[in-house]
Amino acid sequence: MAPAQVSVSERDALVRQAETAGAKGLPVAPLMNKIREGVAKKHDAARIELVLTQMVANMESADGIVREVEPGAAGTARDNAITLLSDALFSGLTADEIRELQRQVQTRAAQDLAGAARGLAYVKEAMLPVNDGTGVMVEAVRHKFRAYEMLDLGREIKRREADYRSGRASLRALRDAIARGTRPDVLLRDSRAVVVERPAVTRPDARTDRPERTVPVDRPQRPERPTDRPAR
């Protein structure tokens, strides 16, 4: 087996970094999971520390947004909202884009905003228009989609990015479907349904495709046998 890239002392230093973030009120579990993941993949300590530093910075930005949206958020709900928002930031969504999403949805539930933001991050990862994706997530929040449903919706958009880019699917059409009250389970089911077009089976035309019958040729008649035999 290849030797581990992180020594015991280096791992302890990484754990202390996560615990310091926890002392500030940030979720510790995602940080500890990232440390374990890095160690399992044989990454060196410097690389893991770099990722942790970026995660902590994103969590601090996410914490600020949560405090703006739902000042009284606490416990698991607050941790989940911070984690989802920081994941959205880590995936490339900006704090300004999250705040614009909040301006349009006007929700006071941090988890709803976080789910919509993470779903929107998938749209941005697919390199689709953020404005159109924002419209989809705004309707999802307004129609009481749960956070995990908005995540699933974003993942499905990312999975079908080629269809959306080619025009076979449309974010505006998806937004309109949500606005009409279509529920997420129906949206995902319809999106995942694969219809294979089979060529129609053509049968030969009995009148034209059958070979013509040949006219029978008259056979030559056999000569008649004599009936009178000569006398013996």
Image: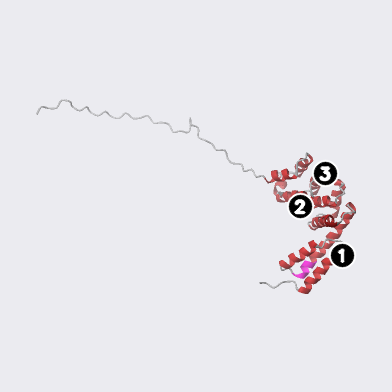
- The alpha-carbon separation of the residues under discs 3 and 2 comes to 19 Å
Instruction: Determine if the magenta segment contains residue 110.
Output: no
Give the answer, above or below, for where 51 lies relative to 179: below
63 sits to left or right of 128: right
Front position among marks 1 and 2: 1
Q: Which residue is mark 2?
A: 122
| Percent of width and height locating residue 184 | 75, 45
- The alpha-carbon separation of the residues under discs 1 and 3 comes to 35 Å
Query: Identity of the amino acid at label 3?
Result: Arg
Residue count near mark 3 (Cα–Cα under 10 Å), binned few <14, some 14–19, many ≥20: some
| Percent of width and height locating residue 196 | 62, 43
Residue count near mark 1 (Cα–Cα under 10 Å), binned few <14, some 14–19, many ≥20: few
Which region is colored magenta? 44-49
Secondary structure of the residue carrying tag 2 is: helix
Q: Which residue is mark 3?
A: 142
- Which mark identifies residue 181? none
Colour approach in the figure: secondary structure
Give the answer, above or below, for where 6 lies relative to 191: below
- The alpha-carbon separation of the residues under discs 1 and 2 comes to 31 Å
- Which mark identifies residue 23? 1
Secondary structure of the residue carrying tag 3 is: helix
110 sits to left or right of 226: right
Secondary structure of the residue carrying tag 1 is: helix
Query: Identity of the amino acid at label 2?
Result: Tyr
Front position among marks 1 and 3: 1
Q: Are marks 3 and 2 in contact (CB under 8 Å)?
A: no
